[in-house]
Amino acid sequence: MSTREQALALDAQDPLAPLREQFSLPEGVLYLDGNSLGVLPRATPARVQQVVQDEWGTGLIRSWNSAGWITLPQRVGNKIARLVGAGADELVVADSTSVNLFKVLSAALSITVADAPQRKTIVSERSNFPTDLYIAEALCRERGFELVLSEPDELPTLLNGRTAVLMLTHVNYRTGRMHDMAALTAAAHAAGALTVWDLAHSAGAVPVDLHAANADFAIGCGYKYLNGGPGAPAFVWAHPRHASRFWQPLAGWMGHAAPFEFTPGYRPAEGISRYLCGTPALLSLAALECGVDTVLAAEPHGGMAALRAKSLALTRLFAAKVQADCPALRLVSPTSDVQRGSQVCFAHDEMAYAVVQALIGRGVIGDFRAPDVLRFGFTPLYLRHVDAWDAAEHLRQVLHTGEWREPRFQQRHAVT
Ligand SMILES: *Cc1c(COP(=O)(O)O)cnc(C)c1O
C-alpha cells in the first residue's frame, strides 16, 4: 500500500494533471461522485450565459439557424462519438437515457422479430440499473415479450433461439463491474440476438469501441462522466447496418426527414437523426458540449487510454488502502483491472448509509446505493492520486473514531 508521499509523487509526474484546471471545484471538497453528477466545467457558465443573453436574448428565433442550434444534437453527438468508438454522424444527443433506452430497445425488438417471430425474450442482468429494467419490463408487457434476468457470469448460457435482445449496462452502477462488450456481443449474435448497451458509467470513464465490439445499439448519459450538468440530455447510437432500417417508436417531428415541410405522414430521417423526437433542450445541450469538451481535452495527453490508466491507478490506490485499513468493509468491485470500471464500492450491512453521510460531513462526497453499498466514483480528469489517498484516510478515521454513529448521520434524505 502506498503512502501519502508516494501519492503526491505520482501527481507530480501526472501528464493529465493540467486537465483539472478545466473545472470549478469547490474548496475543501473531495469529489468522488462524478459517476452520478460530474463537476461543473469552468467554461460552462459563460457559454450558457452567451446562449441565454446573445443567442436567445438577441438572436431569438433566428438562432436556430444563425447560432447552429438546429444541428447541435448532431454536433455534440459527433464529439461523443469520438469517445465511444462510433463513426461520424452515427450518434446524436437526445432526450434522457431512460427514453433513449425505450427507443433502441423497441427498434431492436422490431428488427429481430421481423426475421424471427419466435424470439420472445430480452436477456439482462438482475442487478442492472432499475430504470433500465423498468423500461424493459414495460416494453415486454406492451409487446408480449418476457424479461429474463441473470447473474453476470450466467449471461451467455441464457442466450438461445428465443432471445431477441441482450440488454446490458456496460459498467454496473452498484459494483463497478465491467462486461466484456465484444465477447458478449459475439455470443448474442451467435445466438441470433441483437445487443443494446447502456454506456451511462462508461462514456468518458473507460475506453469503449462500439465498432470493434460490433455492437448494435448504444445509449448513454450526459451528466455523469461527460460533465454535462444536472439532467443533461443523453445520447443514442445505432450501428450503421441498422440505422436506416428501424422504426423509431417516438416518431416526433425532429426525427422526420423534412420537419419544416410540415407534411402529414411521418417519414423518418435517414440514419441516426431519426432518433430525435421533439425540440432539443438547447440550454442543457450547450452545457453538455462544454462538458464533453473537457473529456476531449485529454486527446493531446493520450486520450481515453491515458484517462483509463490514471483511473485504474486511482481506484487501485483507494481500494488497497481501504481494504488494509477498514477490514469491516467488504469490497464489492472487481479487483481485476479489466473487470473494473471507474468506481470502487464497498458494502456493509448496517453502517453503509451513515458512513457515507459522515464522509460527506467531512467534504468527501461519495454516495450510498441501497441497501448496503458505499460507492466512490473516480474521475481522472480532476482527481489526483493524493485525493484518492486522502479520501481513504477519511474513511479510515470515520470508522475508527465511530463518528458515523452520530445521530445526524443516520437521517435519510430523498436522494442518497
Ligand atoms: C444514470 C443511469 C441512468 C439514468 O437515466 P435517466 O434517464 O438520465 O434518469 C440510466 N441507466 C443507467 C445504467 C444509469 O447509470
Image (tube, rainbow, N blue to C red):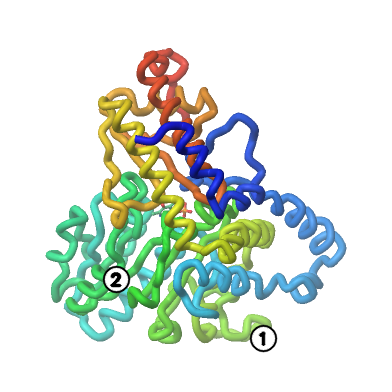
Amino acid type, residue under disc 2 in the picture: Ala
In the rendered image, residue 97, in percent from the top left (x then y), is placed at 46, 59
Residue 387: give x, y in percent of width and height.
50, 36
- 15 versus 360 height, above or below: below
Foreground of the two, 115 or 24: 24
Q: Residue 182, labelled with which disc?
A: 2
In the rendered structure, the answer to whether residue 146 lies left or right of residue 203 reads left
Can the viewer see residue 231?
A: no
Residue 95 locus on image (x, y percent): 53, 62
Q: Residues within 10 Å of mark 2 (few under 14, many from 20)?
A: some
Describe residue 250's horizontal placement relative to residue 118 as left or right.
Answer: right
Mark 1 beta carbon near ligand 1 (under 8 Å) = no
The quarter of the picture where the N terminus appears is: top left
Q: Secondary structure at mark 2?
A: helix
Q: Which numbered circle lies on residue 282?
A: none
Residue 21 position, x and y percent, is: 66, 48
> Residue type at mark 1?
Glu
| Label 2 or label 1, whichever comes before in sequence order | 2
Residue 352 in view: yes
10 Å neighbourhood of mark 1: few (<14), some, or many (≥20)?
A: few
Residue at the location (33% across, 44% down)? 174
Is 272 drawn above or below residue 231 in the view shown?
below
345 displayed left or right of 11: left
Name the quadrant containing residue 188. bottom left
Q: Which residue is mark 1?
A: 261
Residue at the far right in the pictured view: 58
* Residue shown at 54% from the left, 84% from the top: 269
Spatial separation of the CA atoms under disc 2 and disc 1: 42 Å
Does 183 appear above or below 416?
Answer: below
How many numbered discs, if any? Answer: 2
